[in-house]
């Protein structure tokens, strides 16, 4: 079933568009018996699951990792839950999201090349929405926010197909003459539902309306809330910028303000979970999709590298689990956890079933998180990219005849991490870098020049989480074993599909919106037929609609 917009009166009492009710503590929130059904009705044994995925939040960009950014809500939720301090994702948006949804790695599930993951995803791959609904969860699992990967995305309530456009107008440009509207309600462009709200506020309101319209005692709820924040462009309501006047770097100041706005959003969501009777039986998972981008204000210090790299700064993520159902609250989980593990973990937690022939790469890690047991996961294939072979000194010889080290690849096994090829931007970016007005000034960055001619690295991540001491020359037997493991993984990969850009995807050919654009011959004939009558009946074109909407918004601001 689809969840409709709730009446404004249901949630304006605690979500105010311009002030956000952040002064109230959830400990003192007055719970009212709304939408909870008959008080004698037997409650669900299955927990509600709320998965919050944020975009481009750096490892250091949360209060409990020592940031100057104030995140009291995230700090408290994490402190009362379990902090995931050995938690990994992929270095870019789409691969992390596809692996989250399928429980499979890109190198195996055919979304091999990150920049083309959205185009090459197999629609037939199992997704956790289709798996969970065989349990007692709704057939249409409510989700809202940025998609950027999943074929299930069209079932989302309010969503961005791509999610890196303007936070207010919800337009995205890929270049001159290639701009379009990027907000949907279900399968249709959300022209009528769009009121020009800042996306963090908009998605939170939508999530709360879903909570308000559902009976938590009658049926378990899975809510997937994928924020656009804190991805560029760096936009934020002015009142949040006031908090960070002391940060001279404009990018960092705006980024910090966006994180604070996000923190307020999570507070309002948590208050709603309490108000509507979900909280005591809910598992909240919080995760970033990749590391932060220093050139857009993010910080991964003291980790090395940034988003889009296979250094720890690109793939070790902020993450925690908060729930009254946790057995070991207030702890840190240092067991190895990967984004693919959420698929089997949450399906099992929701009492769903997993077919034996799925061949998932993820593991059920609930006992590791909740009770502190060792993780069943012992290794992570971060990636193998056979297209990216830019290491000039890479060769089969450097790989002991076992692996061509020109290929970009990264593998973690136990304490050890191996990288080959060109792992990406490798600087450490300390906090003082942001004291200058321009991020292009790298004077404060710690730069490594002696490894430019290298094509293979080995680190003991447990002893050296900041990747400062390459020990590949000291442990050649470990290097050889891990190169053999890479070669074994590579045998399971399918050929990379990396299609060229197709101009038919331009929004100007698709009613001015981003979204699915491929049509077979029958669909094209029907569209031509409909367009003929539309043009001759003189209906307003998408260009006129777009122009009128922009004029209205300018008048509002």
Image (cartoon, rainbow, N blue to C red):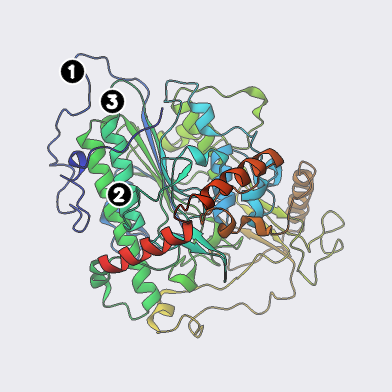
Label 2: element kind: helix
| First in residue order: circle 2 vs circle 1 | 1
Residue located 77% across and 56% down the image: 386
* Residue 261 left/right relative to 275: right
Residue located 47% across and 46% down the image: 334
| First in residue order: circle 2 vs circle 3 | 3
In the picture of the structure, the residue carrying the numbered disc 2 is 266
Residue located 24% across and 14% down the image: 41
Above/below status of 442 relative to 229: below
Front disc: 3 or 1: 3
Above/below status of 371 relative to 417: above
Q: Which mark, residue 39?
A: 1
Residue located 49% across and 85% down the image: 441
Front disc: 2 or 3: 3
Can residue 464 be seen from the camera position used here? no
In this rendered view, identify the residue nearer to me: 263 or 303.
Answer: 263
Q: Quadrant of residue 46?
A: top left
In the picture of the structure, the residue carrying the numbered disc 3 is 215
Image coords of residue 332 (percent x, y): 40, 46
Q: Which mark, residue 18?
A: none
Q: CA distance from mark 2 to mark 3?
A: 21 Å
Q: The C terminus lies in which quarter of the figure?
A: bottom left
Mark 3: give few (<14), some (14-19) or many (20+) Cα within 10 Å: some
């Amino acid at each position: 079933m689809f969840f409709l917009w709730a009446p404004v009166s249901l949630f304006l009492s605690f979500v105010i568009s311009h002030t956000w009710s952040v002064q109230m503590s959830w400990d003192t929130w007055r719970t009212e018996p709304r939408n909870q059904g008959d008080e004698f009705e037997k409650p669900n044994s299955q927990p509600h699951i709320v998965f919050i995925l944020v975009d481009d939040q750096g490892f250091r960009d949360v209060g409990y990792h020592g940031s100057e950014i104030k995140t009291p809500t995230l700090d408290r939720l994490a402190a009362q839950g379990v902090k995931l301090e050995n938690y990994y994702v992929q270095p870019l948006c789409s691969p992390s999201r596809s692996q989250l949804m399928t429980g499979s790695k890109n190198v195996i599930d055919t979304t091999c090349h990150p920049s083309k993951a959205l185009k090459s995803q197999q629609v037939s791959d199992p997704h956790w929405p289709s798996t969970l609904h065989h349990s007692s969860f709704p057939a249409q699992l409510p989700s809202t926010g940025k998609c950027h990967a999943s074929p299930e995305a069209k079932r989302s309530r309010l969503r961005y197909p791509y999610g890196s456009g303007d936070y207010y107008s919800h337009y995205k440009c890929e270049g001159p003459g290639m701009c379009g509207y990027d907000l949907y309600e279900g399968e249709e462009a959300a022209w009528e539902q769009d009121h020009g709200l800042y996306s963090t506020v908009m998605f939170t309101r939508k999530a709360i309306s879903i909570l308000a319209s559902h009976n938590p005692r009658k049926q378990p709820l899975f809510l997937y809330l994928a924020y656009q924040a804190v991805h560029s462009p760096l936009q934020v309501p002015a009142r949040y910028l006031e908090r960070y006047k002391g940060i001279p770097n404009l990018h960092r100041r705006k980024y910090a303000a966006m994180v604070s706005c996000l923190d307020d959003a999570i507070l309002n969501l948590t208050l709603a979970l309490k108000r509507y009777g979900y909280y005591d039986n809910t598992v909240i998972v919080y995760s970033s999709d990749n590391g932060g981008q220093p050139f857009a204000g993010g910080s991964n210090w003291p980790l090395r590298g940034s988003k889009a790299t296979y250094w720890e700064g690109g793939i070790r993520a902020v993450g925690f689990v908060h729930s009254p159902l946790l057995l070991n609250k207030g702890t840190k989980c240092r067991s190895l956890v990967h984004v693919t593990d959420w698929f089997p973990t949450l399906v099992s937690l929701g009492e769903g079933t997993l077919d034996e022939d799925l061949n998932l790469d993820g593991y059920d890690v609930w006992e590791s998180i909740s009770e502190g047991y060792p993780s069943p996961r012992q290794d992570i294939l971060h990636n193998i990219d056979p297209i990216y072979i830019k290491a000039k000194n890479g060769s089969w010889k450097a790989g002991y005849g076992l692996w061509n080290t020109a290929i970009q690849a990264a593998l973690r096994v136990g304490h050890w991490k191996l990288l080959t090829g060109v792992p990406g931007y490798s600087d450490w970016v300390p906090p003082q870098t942001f004291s200058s007005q321009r991020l292009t000034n790298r004077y404060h960055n710690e730069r490594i020049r002696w490894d430019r001619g290298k094509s293979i690295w080995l680190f003991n991540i447990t002893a050296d989480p900041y990747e400062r001491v390459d020990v590949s020359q000291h442990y050649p037997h470990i290097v050889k074993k891990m190169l053999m493991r890479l070669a074994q993984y590579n045998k399971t990969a399918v050929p990379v599909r990396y299609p060229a850009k197709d101009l038919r995807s331009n929004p100007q050919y698709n009613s001015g919106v981003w979204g699915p654009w491929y049509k077979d011959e029958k669909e094209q004939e029907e569209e031509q037929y409909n367009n003929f009558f539309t043009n001759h009946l003189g209906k307003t074109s998408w260009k006129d609609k777009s122009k009128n909407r922009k004029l209205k918004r300018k008048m509002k601001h």
